[in-house]
Amino acid sequence: MKRINFRLFAMGIALALSGAATAETGVGYSINVEGEQKTMADGTFVRETTADDIWFLDNQPEGFASKMVASCSAIWVMGADYSNKGSTFRCTAKDSDGDGYISVGHILEADWTGCGILTVASWGKYAGAKLNGTCQVGGPFAGEDTGTYTWAGEWTLPQ
């Protein structure tokens, strides 16, 4: 169960979006979560994952998509009790036109809270747009290799 929740959170990786002066919210669904977990000499677990995600977005700035696909990768560092020891993720999101952005995130707290996301690159209709937001992991929606997560944030649009 802890491994499943971890996988889901890893997909929370993906969570990488947010709204423009509009408070965007979204939900992401991760599928095909892949990655081997390694146990280090000190008992820490390290897991690198990749996943395909589908995002549903509300309160997007005008012209931004309400549905996107994302490719996400993450490095999860956990204690023997699966507490977070410092985890990061990156998602490349694209809309149906091929326009999109890259978001990165991190989880600060041992209980997997304190998740933050921001954009680091964007192109097409998203060019110059910046996101800053928070995220939260959910749980599996269709088995061990799936996961859900939510986020909220704000877009800063180019002038």
Image (spheres, rainbow, N blue to C red):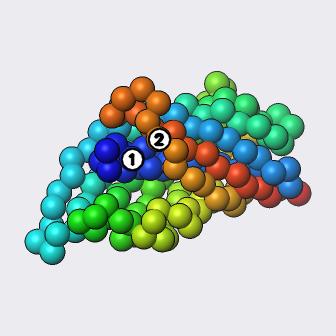
Which residue matches tag 1?
5
**In this rendering, is residue 118 above or below 26?**
below
The residue under label 2 is which amino acid type? Gly
- Decide which of 17, 25 is in the foreground and name it: 25
Question: Which quarter of the picture shows residue 56?
Answer: top right
Q: Are marks 1 and 2 in contact (CB under 8 Å)?
A: yes
Q: Amino acid at mark 1?
A: Asn
Residue 59 drawn at (x, y percent): 82, 40
Disc 1, SS: helix
Image point (36%, 29%), residue name: 143
Q: Which of the 4 image quarters holds residue 93?
A: top right
Q: Position of residue 147 (x, y in %)?
A: 45, 38
Residue 145, by quadrant, is: top left
Q: Nearer the viewer, residue 156 or 149?
A: 149
Is residue 49 among the parts visible in the rendering? no
Q: Which mark is residue 100?
A: none
Which residue occupies the foreground of this view, 62 or 110?
Answer: 110
Q: How many numbered discs, if any?
A: 2
Q: Position of residue 5 (x, y in %)?
A: 39, 47
Residue with the mark numbered 2? 139
